[in-house]
């Protein structure tokens, strides 16, 4: 198989299914259900996930003149993005299944956005990272305003677009400065150019610009101002997707750039990351304490979790990359699960917004109440959940890296987070005082796809806390592969990694 085709196989599959959905949607009569398009997107996601797993057979492969690198690191994030995409599609099949839901456009945009996210995770050339970032961003800008006719949804999309554009400008200017300081824009060229660079301050300024641009994307403080408004106005399934998959892709890029592109400057950029992590944890948790809207509370919670994950960047490369990978997987499982439950509670109208509207929900719908409580407990970091082991792994890595005070700040913030998470759990198990609000909150029946999505996220959150070994091994493998150069630039036809004949074609 051609290395170029192998490198882009998951992205090509998602693109093909996205185009197929766009072509099929106009052929359906206006009154017919659009669920078949959703199932088509699910089939494409499963195929892309299998293609990503298939890439593991070939070790480290470089393609397109060294701009893409397929290794265990990129495959880890490919599988994670495909898993998030699959869960999102399952919980949104019924959400957009109405005459004004524009389901065909939704499913196509979700697939196209995931193409950009996957492209970001396997790119080792910053200009290619920018291409993937734009593909992902344009799709999520549109998805954020998908509740057409709602003022908050339009506001969400516009704010996300404007501030996302500023983030892109910072990122591009950082690339330009990196080229000026090191003479290249690929991560390997930057790492090699730093050793002989006569302008190390410009190189550090370039890295700072890139970190600022990506900090907007992961909603790290103080670049988080868009997050609460966007989460509040966007549809709940879209929030579950955009709060996990794009952030995973951005963190993958940041891991490669910092640990692989600028390893000589770790003593400098680790201080900058330390500050961003502490600010994100503190501002996120304190901001969540003041919220009465559940989606805004979870928005500030995501800011805090970005801070927890950034703590892994202060560790040694082996520990830090593995801890960040595992934390990203755990956060994706519990956050997508939480928004899956919110989607089922609120329905497409999303009248159920405030804490008061959730009063007594767990009594009327015990399964949904128990699942949401489980996901919230995982976000706190209660044992036997994925959140506990993820935080333990990240804080341990920070301590081993000599950043004990950052771990202490993280533990204190985890204690503060208990208050607003437990407050929502308490409200859900309190007998209702507002019958009309509770009727709105319990009016959406669970479908089979919704059951599958909820079960998958709950099982993943539980298994990551009880039996994390397999994912942890894959995270450690991703950490090792990310720091190794590509050794298989071209694959001979019919060659397998274990064959006696060389797999490299000169």
Image (cartoon, grey):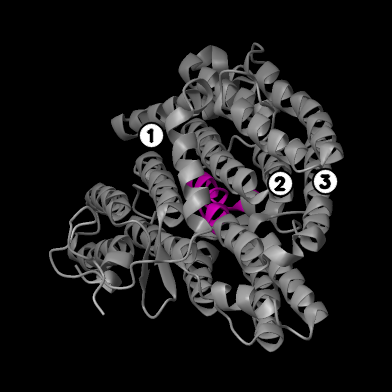
Residue that carries the numbered disc 2 in the rendered image: 315
Q: Position of residue 448 (x, y in %)?
A: 29, 30
- Among numbered discs 2 and 1, the one appearing first in the sequence: 2
Q: Quadrant of the N terminus?
A: bottom left
The label number, if any, that marks residue 278 in the structure image: 3
Asked whether, in this view, residue 131 is left or right of residue 158, the answer is: left
Total numbered labels: 3
Camera-nearest label, 3 or 1: 3
Q: Is residue 139 magenta?
A: no
Is 89 located above or below residue 223 in the figure? above
Numbered disc 3: secondary structure: helix
Asked whether, in this view, residue 156 is left or right of residue 69, the answer is: right
Provide the residue span drawn in magenta: 232-249
Is 432 located above or below residue 228 in the figure? above
The label number, if any, that marks residue 453 in the structure image: 1
- Compute the Cα span from label 3 to label 1: 33 Å
Numbered disc 2: secondary structure: loop
Asked whether, in this view, residue 250 is left or right of residue 81, the answer is: right
- Compute the Cα span from label 3 to label 2: 15 Å
Is 422 located above or below residue 244 in the figure? above
Q: Position of residue 357 (x, y in %)?
A: 64, 28
The residue shown at (19%, 59%) is: 29
The residue shown at (40%, 48%) is: 85
- Residue 490's quadrant in the figure? bottom left
Can residue 443 be seen? no
């Amino acid at each position: 198989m051609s290395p170029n085709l192998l490198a882009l196989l998951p992205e090509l599959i998602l693109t093909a299914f996205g185009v197929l959905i766009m072509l099929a949607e106009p052929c359906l009569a206006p009154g017919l259900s659009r669920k078949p398009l959703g199932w088509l997107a699910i089939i494409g996601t499963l195929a892309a996930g299998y293609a990503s797993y298939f890439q593991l057979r070939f070790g480290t492969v470089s393609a397109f003149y060294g701009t893409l690198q397929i290794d265990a690191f990129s495959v880890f994030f490919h599988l994670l993005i495909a898993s998030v995409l699959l869960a999102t599609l399952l919980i949104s099949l019924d959400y957009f299944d109405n005459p004004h839901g524009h389901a065909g456009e939704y499913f196509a945009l979700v697939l196209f956005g995931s193409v950009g996210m996957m492209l970001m995770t396997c790119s080792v050339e910053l200009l290619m990272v920018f291409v993937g970032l734009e593909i992902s961003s344009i799709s999520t800008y549109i998805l954020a305003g998908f509740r057409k006719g709602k003022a908050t949804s339009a506001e969400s999309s516009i704010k996300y677009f404007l501030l996302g554009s500023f983030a892109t400008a910072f990122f591009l200017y950082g690339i330009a400065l990196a080229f000026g300081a090191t003479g290249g824009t690929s991560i390997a060229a930057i790492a090699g150019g730093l050793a002989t660079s006569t302008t190390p301050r410009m190189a550090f300024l370039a890295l700072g610009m890139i970190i600022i641009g990506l900090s907007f994307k992961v909603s790290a403080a103080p670049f988080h101002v868009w997050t609460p408004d966007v989460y509040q106005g966007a549809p709940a399934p879209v929030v579950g997707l955009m709060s996990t998959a794009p952030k995973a892709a951005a963190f993958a890029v940041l891991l490669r750039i910092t640990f692989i592109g600028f390893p000589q400057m770790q003593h400098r950029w680790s201080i900058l990351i330390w500050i961003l992590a502490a600010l994100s944890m503190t501002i996120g948790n304190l901001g969540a304490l003041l919220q009465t809207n559940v989606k805004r509370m979870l928005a500030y919670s995501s800011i805090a979790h970005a801070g927890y994950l950034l703590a892994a960047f202060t560790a040694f490369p082996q520990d830090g990359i593995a801890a960040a990978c595992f934390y990203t997987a755990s956060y994706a499982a519990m956050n997508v699960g939480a928004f899956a439950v919110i989607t089922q509670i609120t329905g497409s109208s999303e009248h159920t917004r405030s804490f008061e509207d959730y009063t007594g929900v767990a009594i009327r719908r015990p399964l949904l109440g128990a699942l949401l409580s489980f996901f919230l407990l995982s976000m706190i970091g209660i044992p036997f959940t994925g959140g506990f082991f993820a935080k333990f792994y990240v804080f341990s890595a920070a301590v081993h890296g000599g950043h004990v005070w950052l771990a202490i700040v993280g533990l204190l913030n985890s204690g503060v987070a208990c208050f607003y998470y437990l407050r929502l759990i308490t409200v859900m198990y309190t007998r209702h005082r507002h019958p009309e609000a509770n009727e709105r909150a319990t009016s959406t029946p669970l479908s089979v796809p919704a059951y599958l999505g909820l079960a998958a996220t709950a099982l993943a959150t539980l298994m990551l806390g009880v039996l994390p070994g397999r994912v942890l091994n894959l995270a450690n493998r991703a950490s090792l592969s990310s720091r190794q150069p590509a050794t298989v630039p071209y694959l001979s036809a019919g060659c397998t990694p274990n064959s006696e004949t060389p797999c490299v074609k000169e």
